[in-house]
Image (cartoon, grey):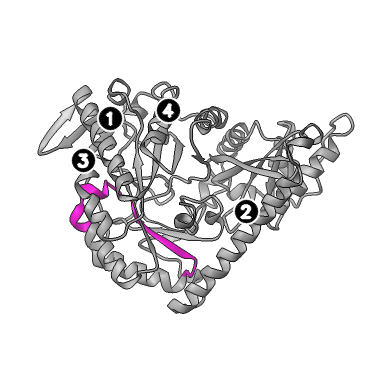
Amino acid sequence: MEDRSIRHPCYSEDAHHYYARMHLPVAPACNIHCNYCNRKFDCVSESRPGVVSRVLKPQEAADKVREIAHTLPQLSVVGIAGPGDPLANPRQTFETFSLIREEWPDVELCLSTNGLKLEDHLDDLERLNIRHVTVTVNAVDPEVAERIYDRVFWRGKTYKGRDAARILLERQAAGIEGLREKGILCKINSVHIPGINADHLLRVAAAAKAWGAFTHNIMPLIISPGSLYERERRTGPSGIEALKVQEACSAVMPVMRHCRQCRADAIGFLGGDTASAVEPDVKAIRKTYTREEREAIQLELEKQMLGKRGERERRGGACGDDVRERRPAPVRIAVATRGNGKVNLHFGHAKEFLVYEVEGQRLQLLGVRKVQAYCNGKADCTDPASKRRMLEETIAMLSDCRILLTSGIGEQPTRLVREAGIVPIIGKGELEQELLEAAKYYRHLGRGAFSLEPKPTSNLGG
C-alpha cells in the first residue's frame, strides 16, 4: 500500500514536502447539501473545500494540466474534488480524467466524493486506473447525520431529515466496500463539528477501519458565510480540541495530520500553492520541463524522501524503549512554512502553522492550525485594533505550543508571543533539523528557573 502512495502528497505525510498536486474544478453540481456549506460564496483569499474562482470545462482542465505539468515538475497527482461532487457530474469528471490519462499516464489520478453515487461508478474508476479515492463520512448513525446534512438528492427525488441521512450512509458504506473489492485505496475524510459529532468520530474511525480504509483525515469545521451553521453561530474546534479527537481516533486506525482543506482549484505543494487553477503565477515559471526531465526530478525527490525517512528511523532507533526513562520530555513546536520541507515563512504572513511534537530525536506531526494572516499586505491591515485582535487569536490557537519556529517575526508579535509563554525562534533551514535544534535550545533554556529568552530575532515587521 505504501508504494502506491509514495508520491501522493495527500496520502503520504513524507510526500507532501516533495510532491505537488493539482485540483481541477470541473464538477459544479452537488447531490447533497451540508449545513456548513454555501458554495455560492467565493473569495480569492478563501482556502477551503468547495471554493473555486471559475469552473472549467474538461478540455480546459486538460490544457491546464499540460501547462502546469511542463512547468511544475514535482506535480505527481491530479484530482477532482468539486466545487460540487465529482460523481454528481460524471460526464465532466470522467471526460476530464480520460483526457489526462491519455496524455499523462504517469500522473496519479485522484477523486474526492461524498459517496452517494460511488457504487454506481466503481467500474469507471477501475477502467481509468484511479487508485486513490477520498470519501467524506461525517457520521455513521442517521441520528447524528441528520443534524449535518440538510437534504439529499437521490434517484430524481429530494429527501430530508432522517430519510436523507439513512440513504447517504447506506450508499457510502456500499461504495467504500466496493472500493476495497476493487483494490482502490480509500481515505476517509470527516469534518469535526463540536456539539454534533465530536464524540461520535470514534465510531466513524471504527467503521473506516472495518471498511479497510487507508487512513482517516479528521478536519476542523470551516463554516461558510451564509450557511445554516453560521446562522446558528457554531464554531470550529480549538487546536487542542481537534488534537484530542485526532489522538483518540489514532488509537483505532492511522490518522492523517497534514491536511490543508484545499480549494477545489488548488495547485502546488500543500500549504504553498503556486497559483489558482485559473490564473497561474507566470513569475514562478522559470523553465519548461520535458517528460523525461520531470520523471528524473521525481525519481531524485523520491530518493531524497526515502533517505530522510531512513535517517528519521535511525534516529528513533537510537532512542529505543529501553532508554525511554532518559529521553527528554516532549516539546510542542509550531512552524510557519510554505512547504518544501523548510522553515521559510514569516510569522505575519502565515495562514496556518504545522504543530510538531519533538521527543529526543523523534518528530511527530500533530496537525495543522489554520489562522487568519496577521499581515496580509492590504490597506485594512493598518487598523491597529484589527491587527491586535488577529494577533491575539493566532497566539491563542498556538497556546499549547512552547516554541514558535518562523523565518521572521516583528517586535510586537515577539513581545506578545513571549508573554504567552512561547519562545519565538528564527530558522531558515531544513524543517526537521530546525525542529531538533529548536527543541534542544528550549531544553537548554529550561535548565534553570525557566526564565525563557529567545535567540536574537530579526524584527522584519508583522
Q: Nearer the viewer, mark 3 or mark 4?
A: 4
**Residue labelled with disc 4:** 201
* Mark nearer the N terminus (3 vs 1): 3
Helix, strand or loop at label 3? It is: loop
**Residue labelled with disc 2:** 345
Please tell me whether residue 298 belongs to the stretch shown in magenta. Answer: no
Q: Are marks 3 and 4 in contact (CB under 8 Å)?
A: no
Helix, strand or loop at label 2? It is: loop
Q: Position of residue 130 (x, y in %)?
A: 32, 57
* Mark nearer the N terminus (2 vs 1): 1
Using the rendered view, name the quadrant where residue 116 is placed: top left
Q: Amino acid at mark 2?
A: Leu
Q: Nearer the viewer, mark 2 or mark 4?
A: 4
- Residue 107 visible in rendering: yes
**Residue labelled with disc 1:** 149
Q: CA distance from mark 2 to mark 4?
A: 33 Å
Q: Amino acid at mark 3?
A: Asn
Identify the magenta region: 72-92
Q: Position of residue 78 (x, y in %)?
A: 37, 60
**Residue labelled with disc 3:** 31
